[in-house]
Amino acid sequence: MSRSPITEALTRICRRGRPVRLAAAGVVIALTAGAGSAAASAGPPKDPVPAIAAPRPPSAALTPVKRAKTSSHTVTLPTGDRFRVVVGPDGAQTADPVARKGTGGAFTRFVFRGDTYVIPAAAAPYLGTTLDWTLFDVGYLVRAKLDDAHTASLPVRVTATRATAEALPATSVTSGSGRAAKAEITKRDAGGLGRLLAKRWHDGTLSGVDRIELAAPAGTPKPPAAPTTAATTAAKGTRFHTLTVGGIDRDGKPGVAIGFVHNVDDGSLFSAGLAWPGEGKKAFVVPEGTYSVELAIFGAPRNDVMSSGSFVAQPEVKVARDTTVTLDARTAVPYRANLESPPSPDMSRIDLFTYLRTSAAGDRTGIAPSSPLGALTMGLISWPANKNSGLYAAPTKAVTKGRFDFTPMTTMTAGNPSSLGSDSTYELVFPAAGTVPASLTYTVKAADLTTVHASLYDSVSDDASPGPLNRFHRVYLPSGWSQFGYGDLPAAGDRTDYIYSSSPDQVVWQSIVGPDRGERLEGRRMTVRPGQVINEEWNKGPDVPSPAATYVQRAQPGFLDSSDTQVDRPFLQVCGMCRQGDLGMAYIQTAGDSDPLHFTEQSTDKSVLEFYRNGTLAYTDRQSAFGPAPLGLPMLPGPADYRLTWTFSHEATSYSPSSTDWRFRSAASDPAAPLPKDVQCVDTTRGCSFLPLLFVNYDLALDHGSRAPAGKPFDVAFRVSHQEHQAAPAGVAATVEVSYDNGGTWSAPKDAERRADGTYAASITHPEYTDAGRWVSLRVKAHDADGSTVTQTNIRAYRLTS
């Protein structure tokens, strides 16, 4: 059975950290299954009920975390309702109903402090008073081995007379005295207790029973604290009501819907969803409060990820009684983003809607910008693979509680979307804070575009190059980050692309390039102005350590690698090479090319790092894959001489290793580093001092295949700098050595001269071309007035051509 183009594309998207080639669809997309996004799976997407979690604070601890495996369990609740609970590698849980013998009515799911709670409608009025919340914490029931695979009954304590406890359906007393009874609820008969609860639903009490709570057996984990906010509202007598949601399609007929329903005071009170592939009217039992409903409305039946829907939201619904909300897609307006002067009348395009509704408590629900799979599930993405059917959204009023971020995005190209060549791309972003605007028609003037001229270089090689894998932009928005659009298989050489945001002060851009060999290269994050012109060079080697400071909050491209979709401080960095007391911290990255501030995070194939104190080896880091994680270097308290060496190579260019030998002097009493406000030390409560390492980056006159002509004079040009945010070194002197036999023999050192632009250069003359001498290796030695030195050796730095 053949798969649709979009399915083919999705199955090939995103090995973590590597450039992605989507030849069929011509699209660069990172899929992240995040909090509030539709669940990702190999088959049809499942119920898009979000995990509700407060945003995580920034952290400078960037070491990769070893992940556990996913497990599946069946849990029966005291009402007899059964759910399949899947526990992910990070401990997060999802719960879906299975063959139910309980009340069979509506139920509520929410996440509180990492645990998923499932509340059948019949139990809702009793929670926090008669019924213990832990009885419905399916995450805890799994951890305590009270799931169906381990026990056929639930141990409980009943505050009632023994006779009253015995009279409860499915309940047998094992011991008791006075008004305290230990009992068991038999799971296979628990539906009877559920029906009794439903019968007394409007009273919210059971005659003669004060409390039923879980009696966790000895040796089981301690039960978590109750969802305090929700428990408090229940204890105060907050009433529960039925909230029924549904939709009308654009044709005026009842539609099916996918989306979310959640409390906007605090998502831990209630958050649930309407599942893929779409549902009609659905009822939820909710406590009184204000709710947000965000749905994609489709004509029934909704059984194809390529069908077209309309996004309709009612972000503030007051529920003080039984309430029905019908979202009407006939109010939706079309999204049309175009160029005032398009280069072609019929350009290939991708349109995308993302949205996030943030409660007053800070939890977020919706389709994060980094989740095109969620957008696909809700029909909020339009591209040639689903016949470019166009997107619609209904305007909304501004919210008064929390935030509502709605962002349409468009990318276009006049070229072949599966292989761009030198054709330009246009990336357009239209953030809308607080509402879905009344009009979604945009026309972008040529003068308002930001022009990005880029030169793409192939890595040095004897083999014919397939050309760069991709070139695109990552976009940081107030609601998260995104990377999507046409960017596959651009041609090596010079190209021009265009970017635009309707809110330039709110949107941060970052250029990304996947070269023909090696890892994905990243540039500086930046805001841009309408009409601005930016010039970039990419992969113009050789590949050397980067002096760029590390960003603390990082986007995590991948399929299931990350649930953190928010980057709310995109410019926040950690000092790259600093010390605090006796600890030196090295956030060291590769892929510094002709632009010193390009980098790749931990992406080498082989890496050997050694650290010496006063000539004695103090630390070694050897990796067969990836580069060194953030390093804690043991420093001496008094003034001392240090040496740090790092040799690395990439898998695809193992014949071209880079080796750097730094020598410097440091003491705990060194002056504090004058860091900008968005750059922090590892321990943010105190200052730090710079480690005075010198970095070398080359600026060689190579062709786009990383080659230079044989038999002609050639300037070996390079920069010598400190790390980012540190003042430039003073009194620099440097020499250059050249080898044509892969480092077997070297020329005599030649002094480099400082040029007017601050770079250094030594003029050499290449020999005539021979097969044996076609490779050029470089060694640069430099020192500054403070005595810091660097020796950098690059084997096969570039190639000669006849």
Image (cartoon, rainbow, N blue to C red):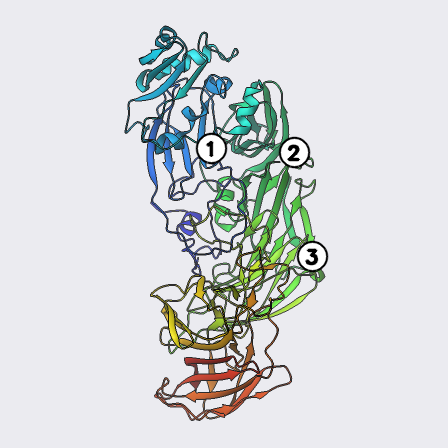
Residue 473 position within the rendered picture, expressed as x and y whole percent measured from the top left: 56, 59
Looking at the rendered image, the disc whose residue lies closer to the viewer, 1 or 2, is 1
**Disc number for residue 779:** none
The residue under label 1 is 275
In the image, taking residue 581 as reference, residue 776 lies left or right, namely left
Say above or below: 476 vs 797: above
Inspect the image, locate mark 3, and give the three-letter code of the amino acid beneath it.
Glu
Quarter of the C terminus within the rendering: bottom left
Element assignment for label 1: strand
Residue 506 locus on image (x, y percent)? 66, 52
Q: Amino acid at mark 1?
A: Ala
Q: Indicate which disc, 1 or 2, sits on the residue closer to the N terminus.
A: 1
**Looking at the image, is mark 1 or mark 3 earlier in the sequence?**
1
The residue under label 2 is: 331
The answer to whether 393 is drawn above or below residue 431 in the figure is above
Callout in the foreground (1, 3): 1
